[in-house]
Amino acid sequence: MYVKLFTIFFPYTAFVKSDRPVAFPNLTIKYVRGADPVIKLMDEDGDVMETLAIDKWNTDSVEEFLNTYLILPGQGDDDTDKSANEV
């Protein structure tokens, strides 16, 4: 599975309040009151492929995960890029 889009649901974290999300153009952040924080891995059609609970992750863990698995615009057409982004 290749990650094309991410959606993060969390009420409040330092990651969301910082300037870090700007570095990930395919990242969408939604606030859901009372919901546990999750990352939803989505395909290019917007269908949810996997949901990961991140309630015990710190800001650096979220950023490291996104740097590792997020396919940025313009990436993904080359097989060498895809191998680095497999889940």
Image (tube, helix red, strand yellow):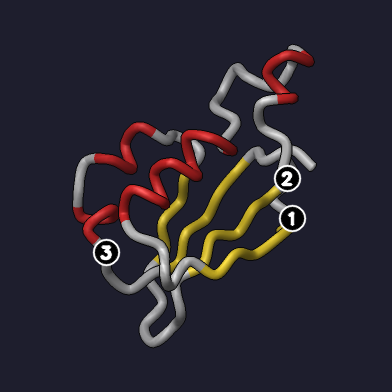
Q: How dense is the environment of label 1, judged by Cα within 10 Å: few (below 14), some, or many (20 and up)?
A: few
Question: Is there CB contact under 8 Å for labels 1 and 2?
Answer: yes
Picture coordinates of residue 2 (x, y %)? 74, 38
Pick the front one: 63 or 72: 63
Instruction: Give the mark toward the camera: 3 or 1.
Output: 3
Q: Which mark is residue 13?
A: 3
Picture coordinates of residue 52 (x, y %)? 60, 64
SS class, disc 2? loop
Pick the front one: 81 or 61: 61
Q: Name the residue under label 2.
A: 43
Could you tell me which quadrant the N terminus lies in?
top right
Instruction: Give the mark toward the camera: 3 or 2.
Output: 3
Q: Mark 1 points at which residue?
A: 47
Side (left or right) of 77 relative to 59:
right
What is the spatial separation of the Cα atoms under label 3 and label 2, in whole angstroms?
25 Å
Q: How dense is the environment of label 2, judged by Cα within 10 Å: few (below 14), some, or many (20 and up)?
A: some
Q: How dense is the environment of label 3, judged by Cα within 10 Å: few (below 14), some, or many (20 and up)?
A: few
